[in-house]
Amino acid sequence: MKKHGRPAKIAVKDVMTANVVSVGKYDDINRVIQTVSELNIGGLPVVDNENHVVGIISEADILSAMGMEKEPTFRDILKHLVGESLPERKLGDIVGDIMTFPVVTVRFDEDISVAAQAMHEKRIRRIPVVDAENRLMGIVSRRDIIRAISRKQISLWKRP
């Protein structure tokens, strides 16, 4: 028999990847390409010397720097029609030249629904997890959220 009502809250800290690889703003882009390729990950948080999150660099950022941009979406065209500029190709040899900033982050003590909503609204796949001082604690991906929901629903809706 299914239980009704709101599902129990799940904290981001309980589903995030804690041992996350990060890069610095002044790191060489070739190092990032090698790291992303070797670790089979889609992006890396960018941090300063005190481990504060200052950006994120993704496969899309790298491809843009290489000149492989995506075609504008319908949403992009609508934004352009109301006066917003279309995204331009990013150029540079260091992370800070091509990273995305400001970066969307989520606090470690937030519910995963906050992270999921931000990912949906911003059309992103991963979000750095930070503490109250914006220091990197981990990263949460869409896959992490799906896994957490799957585990929770299995335990919520099992028959006694």
Image (tube, rainbow, N blue to C red):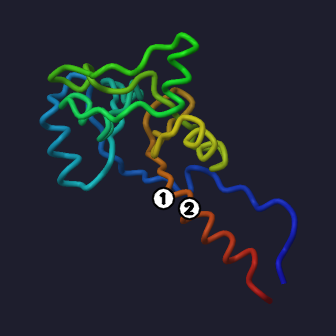
The crowd level at tag 1 (other Cα within 10 Å; few <14, some 14-19, many 20+) is: few
Residue for point 18% across, 54% down: 38
87 with respect to 33 (left or right): right
Locate residue 70, reporting x and y percent. 33, 35
Please tell me in which quadrant of the rendered image residue 87 appears: top left
The crowd level at tag 2 (other Cα within 10 Å; few <14, some 14-19, many 20+) is: some
Q: Which of 118 and 109 lies nearest the eye of the viewer?
A: 118
Residue placed furthest toward the top? 83
Residue placed furthest toward the bottom? 160
- Under mark 2, the amino acid is Ile
Q: Is residue 136 above or below residue 155?
A: above
Please tell me in which quadrant of the rendered image residue 115 appears: top right
30 with respect to 131 (left or right): left
**Disc 2 and disc 1 in contact, CB within 8 angstroms:** yes
So how many labels did they put on this image? 2
Label 2 SS: helix
- Under mark 1, the amino acid is Arg
Q: Which label was assigned to residue 125? A: none
Q: Which label was assigned to residue 143? A: 1
Give the alpha-carbon distance from disc 2 to disc 1, as whole Å. Answer: 5 Å
The quarter of the rendered structure image containing the C terminus is bottom right
Locate residue 97, reporting x and y percent. 25, 19
Q: Which of 142 and 60 lies nearest the eye of the viewer?
A: 60
Residue for point 34% across, 29% down: 47
Q: Which label was assigned to residue 146? A: 2
134 with respect to 116 (left or right): left
Locate residue 36, reporting x and y percent. 23, 47
Locate residue 44, reporting x and y percent. 32, 40
Residue for point 44% across, 45% down: 138
